[in-house]
């Protein structure tokens, strides 16, 4: 069910009915739009009033209907992992897998990978996720600390959620054209547009492929899936990014990127090399991106700045039901450590890690109208599954800030008014950040295990280590004075010998603000 509809039904009960939408595009109109035809909408509509978009490239696209339900791609769930999970369960009686009655019976790959966070994955389980392809170009970067002896290429999946964004196609083109090995990349785009008004992301920057076939997007068309939905169904980036995670299909690495970024030359080799430097299977390289100005030569794709942001600043904002922990503007500087640097927080604008991250910690589909707060939600869920977050030493893409006149999803707020409070209540409840006084507030409990916390780590330990006080909804200030070299030196000795992340049970450090009298 569409998350906005679900929330309003929860609020108003069975008396709530979905408003009949305005006339929808016909299949012919949508097909023409996605292939770059200029025909405007005609005055007739599909006989059932629905949009049913067939695949573009290798993609399968959305189906929306008047009863509040949508047809969307299924999560990747390869059959061998389901068979192994079922065999384990049959042999063990549930013992090794946690014997939890609340575990969903679908999602065989997640049952295989620690049984929905009941335990930390084993190294063998983690390494079994991810595809490779033959390297037909043997001029591979010798500095890539790859442990793959046969020199195959690890594949990369990029999830891009776009809301009426004219730069989306430029981002896709940049990802392919600037990659050293574009053949390893597959992109899934969730393209939310107004049909007949907005340009589809599937139309390359230089025009349709039949007119300009030499564009990187055209040469790699079979490596792109477009999930195109009507903009009026948007309820914020969380649901759009949830749909993006459904487009993952077993790639070795997974990237999340905004729809208005530009990549540096050979970015794929660069970020993979940095990931291997962490020597941590559970490493997620993530940061707020620097702006394009003064950081990248847009013509050549070369960096012109050595500075990069580091994730360390967060505080509560909002009041009442809307109060939540939000990451603020992050400090930026030239790194003193020439490797990825441990930090506490995950950023939605850029994330790079192993593919099993998006399998284990997919975006929650039941969080309508969440924008501020999505990052602490996914970050804490990732922490509870055993993942560690790092700021990269070098940025591999840059962000276009200060854009004027670009539509925002907030233009739909009246359609599902009132559903946002349930989304924020659910977000804070699931990650253990509702103060005791608020724990009786209503929230949607559907799929609380599927999109909930794991048991590999207790999030209370996270709050203690990094000075977050849930009951008073305050934080210890000046955390940025610890994150960086001090945190790296303090925490690296607690890396598990098998490379499966930091052992927080051995970390006794507790951050306390020693600079309270300073701003």
Image: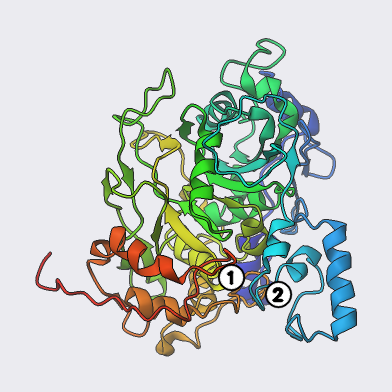
Quarter occupied by the N terminus: bottom right
Compared with 337, 500 (above or below) is: below
Give how far apart the Cα atoms at labels 1 and 2 are.
36 Å
Q: Residues within 10 Å of mark 1 (few under 14, many from 20)?
A: many
Closer to us: mark 1 or mark 2? 1
Q: Quadrant of residue 25?
A: top right
Q: Position of residue 247 (x, y in %)?
A: 71, 47
Q: Earlier in the sequence, mark 1 or mark 2?
A: 2
Q: Position of residue 50 (x, y in %)?
A: 78, 44
Q: Is residue 309 left or right of residue 205?
A: left
Mark 2 lies on a secondary structure that is helix
- Which residue lies at the image location 79% right of the left edge and 28% below the top edge? 28
Q: Is residue 41 shown to the viewer in this render?
A: no
User: As rendered, which of 135 and 368 lies closer to the eye?
Assistant: 135
Q: Which residue is mark 2?
A: 14
Q: Do the CB atoms of the residues marked 1 and 2 lie less than 8 Å apart?
A: no
Tell whether 321 sits left or right of 164. Answer: left
Task: State the image quarter where residue 16 is shown.
Answer: bottom right
Q: Which residue is mark 1?
A: 385
**Residue 251's disc number:** none
């Amino acid at each position: 069910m569409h998350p906005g509809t679900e929330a309003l039904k929860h609020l108003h009960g069975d008396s709530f009915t979905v408003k009949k939408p305005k006339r929808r595009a016909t299949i012919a109109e949508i097909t023409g739009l996605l292939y770059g035809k200029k025909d405007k909408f005609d005055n007739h509509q599909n006989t059932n009033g629905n949009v049913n978009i067939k695949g573009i490239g290798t993609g399968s696209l959305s189906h929306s209907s008047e009863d509040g339900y949508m047809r969307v791609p299924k999560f990747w769930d390869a059959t061998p992992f389901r068979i192994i999970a079922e065999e384990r369960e049959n042999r063990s009686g549930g013992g090794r897998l946690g014997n939890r009655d609340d575990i969903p019976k679908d999602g065989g790959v997640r049952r295989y990978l620690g049984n929905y966070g009941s335990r930390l994955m084993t190294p063998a389980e983690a390494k079994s996720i991810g595809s490779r392809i033959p390297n037909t170009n043997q001029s591979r970067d010798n500095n890539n600390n790859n442990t793959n002896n046969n020199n195959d290429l690890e594949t990369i999946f990029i999830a891009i959620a776009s809301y009426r964004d004219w730069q989306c196609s430029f981002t896709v083109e940049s990802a392919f054209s600037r990659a050293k090995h574009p053949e390893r990349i597959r992109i899934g785009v969730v393209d939310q547009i107004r049909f007949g008004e907005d340009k589809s992301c599937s139309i390359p920057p230089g025009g349709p492929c039949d007119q300009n076939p030499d564009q990187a997007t055209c040469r790699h068309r079979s490596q792109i899936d477009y999930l195109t939905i009507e903009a009026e169904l948007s309820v914020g980036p969380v649901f759009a990014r949830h749909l993006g995670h459904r487009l993952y299909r077993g790639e070795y690495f997974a990237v999340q990127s905004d729809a208005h970024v530009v990549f540096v030359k050979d970015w794929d080799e660069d970020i993979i090399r940095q990931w291997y430097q962490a020597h941590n299977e559970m490493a997620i390289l993530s940061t707020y991106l620097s702006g394009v100005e003064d950081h990248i030569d847009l013509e050549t794709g070369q960096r012109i700045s050595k500075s990069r942001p580091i994730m360390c600043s967060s505080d509560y904002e909002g009041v009442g039901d809307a109060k939540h922990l939000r990451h603020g503007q992050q400090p930026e500087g030239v790194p003193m450590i020439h490797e990825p640097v441990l930090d506490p927080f995950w950023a939605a604008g850029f994330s790079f890690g192993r593919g099993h991250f998006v399998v284990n910690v997919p975006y929650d589909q039941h969080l309508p109208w969440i924008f501020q707060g999505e990052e602490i939600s996914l970050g804490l869920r990732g922490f509870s599954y055993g993942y560690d977050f790092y700021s990269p030493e070098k940025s591999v893409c840059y962000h276009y800030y200060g854009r004027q006149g670009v539509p925002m999803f907030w233009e739909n707020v009246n359609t599902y008014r009132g559903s946002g409070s349930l989304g924020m209540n659910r977000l804070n409840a699931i990650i253990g950040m509702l103060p005791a006084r608020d724990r009786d507030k209503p929230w949607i409990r559907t799929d609380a295990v599927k999109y909930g916390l794991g048991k590999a780590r207790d999030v209370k330990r996270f709050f203690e280590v990094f000075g977050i006080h849930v009951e008073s909804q305050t934080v210890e200030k000046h955390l940025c004075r610890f994150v960086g070299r001090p945190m790296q030196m303090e925490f690296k000795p607690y890396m598990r010998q098998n490379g499966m992340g930091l052992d927080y049970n051995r970390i006794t450090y507790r951050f306390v603000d020693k600079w309270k009298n300073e701003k």
